[in-house]
Amino acid sequence: MQKQLDALPDDVYDRIAEKIEHLAEDPRPDGVVKMKGSDHEYRIRIGDYRVRYEIDDKELIIILLQCKRRKDVYRK
């Protein structure tokens, strides 16, 4: 995940980093989409990019899975 973030242009990185920091306060913000087929996986949209993450409510942990352009984030 860190490699994906480091590869982003600076302006995009700043926007995404800000949104990720806000997830600590509100892991399910307006516009969040729960991913089908998973009980704990969500996605937020930031321009052309998508951040996929899991929420562990019991441990109060957010696990970042992917941060990629929309066209690439759903490919395995």
Image: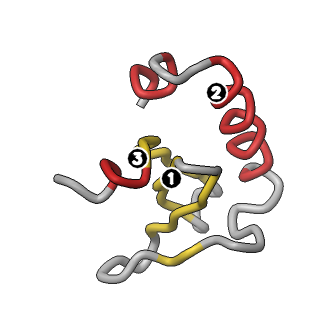
Please, is residue 2 above or below residue 31 in the view? above
Residue to which mark 3 is pinned: 65
Observer-nearest of 7 and 19: 7
Q: Would you say the residues marked 2 and 1 are in contact, meaning their CB atoms lie under 8 Å apart?
A: no
9 with respect to 63 (left or right): right
Which of the two labelled residues, at mark 2 and mark 1, occupies the earlier sequence position?
2
Q: Residues within 10 Å of mark 1 (few under 14, many from 20)?
A: many
- Residue 72 in percent (x, y) is at 31, 48
Alpha carbons under labels 2 and 3: distance apart: 16 Å
- Residue 34 in percent (x, y) is at 50, 77
User: What is the three-letter code of the residue carrying label 2?
Assistant: Tyr
User: What is the three-letter code of the residue carrying label 1?
Assistant: Arg
Q: Residue 26 carries which label?
A: none
Alpha carbons under labels 2 and 1: distance apart: 12 Å
The residue tagged with tag 2: helix, strand or loop?
helix
- Residue 58 in percent (x, y) is at 58, 66
Q: Residue at x 75, y 49 (%)?
A: 24
Residue to which mark 1 is pinned: 50
- Residue 22 in percent (x, y) is at 79, 48
Which of the two labelled residues, at mark 2 and mark 3, occupies the earlier sequence position?
2
